Image: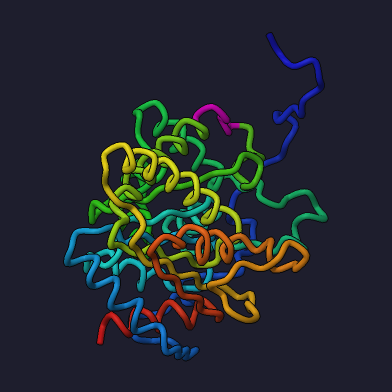
Amino acid sequence: MSTRYRTFERSRLIVKPLAERRSDLDLSHLLALGDAPLLFEHPDLDAVAVRLQQAKANGAARILMMGGHLIRAGVSRYIIDLMRRGLIDHVAMNGAGLIHDYELALTGGTTESVARYITTGEFGLWRETGELNDIIRQAAENGQGLGEHAGESFAQFPYRETSVVHAAWKYRVPVTVHVGIGYDILHEHPNCDGAAVGQASYTDFLIFASTVERLEGGVLLSFGSAVMAPEVYLKALAMARNVAHQEGSDLSHFTTAVFDLIPIEGDFRRELTKTDPGYYFRPHKTILVRTVADGGESYYFCGDHRATFPALWRMLHE
């Protein structure tokens, strides 16, 4: 049976090569380790650094959840270094994060202007970027997670040393990609296979949920993800706690930290009322309040990712 409604015929699209696109970011935007032009200081950063070190020593989970902007902030080398040192043992990102990482590893450039290309109908429709759909299809055929097969595939790319996804595969750190259908430019392309995207990304969700089972005594960091991180984490935590309760084990003593650009007025460890617009900022109520209410602790840091992530790295380095 097929849909009764008319669907968009993708064969009508013109897909152009990336050589014809102007990318707004290139490799010169990536910060070298220790080279942070924006400074950030906060008295709670030391506590988060200590918790990460303790979690590593105890074998508990050290999870980094991130939006695509963290890649665009140019801190990939910092993320890679923390994976190499074992201070991050799981990276969870949205589809945009994968696309930016892929384009940088493949071509040395990423990020297009929506304002420039949406008026001409060219936004997102670039041939080489669309080839990531073929990697996703292969991941599904292999029974692999989307992030796992992407990291392995990026090994052939000329700028692979800048890739968080490839470094995760190299260091045997799970990188999971949590995709919302229709969110990403990949879904515009004629070669996008929705079933493959769903299968590979759902495998990643189950990999993520398995890591969350080790969160007792661990740390979960969320950088710049207003929807994906709190929602995916919430469901995975519910699954992990369901099993933990059956086994008589605990999953309530861990640390969460949110790094974002939205100021939170007052006590960020308290939930706002529904009449306050800030109530609908999910990282606040989900990651900082509700899920740590039974023995965990939480921290909030408001600042530019280009400053906050290097600041955390500097604490851990020192």
Quarter of the image with the C terminus in it: bottom left
Residue drawn at (53%, 56%) of the image: 230
Q: Is residue 193 magenta?
A: yes
Q: Quadrant of residue 165?
A: bottom left
User: Where's residue 27, x and y in %?
Assistant: 46, 71
The reply to whether residue 158 is in sight is: no
Q: Nearer the viewer, residue 201 or 31?
A: 201
Residue at the extreme left: 57
Q: Is 138 placed left or right of 229 in the picture?
A: left
Q: Is 299 placed left or right of 3 in the picture?
A: left
Q: Is 275 placed left or right of 92 in the picture?
A: right
Instruction: Tell me if residue 291 comes above or below residue 298 in the rendering.
Output: above
Q: Give the residues in magenta.
A: 191-196
User: Where's residue 245, x and y in %?
Assistant: 33, 42
Residue drawn at (74%, 27%) of the image: 9
User: Where's residue 253, x and y in %?
Assistant: 33, 62
User: Where's residue 203, x and y in %?
Assistant: 40, 35
Q: Is residue 49 magenta?
A: no
Q: Is 181 placed left or right of 198 in the picture?
A: right
Residue at the extreme top: 1
Q: How is the image coloured?
A: rainbow
Residue drawn at (49%, 42%) of the image: 132
Q: Quadrant of residue 23?
A: bottom right
Total tally of numbered discs in the picture: 0
Quarter of the image with the N terminus in it: top right
The reply to whether residue 26 is in sight is: yes
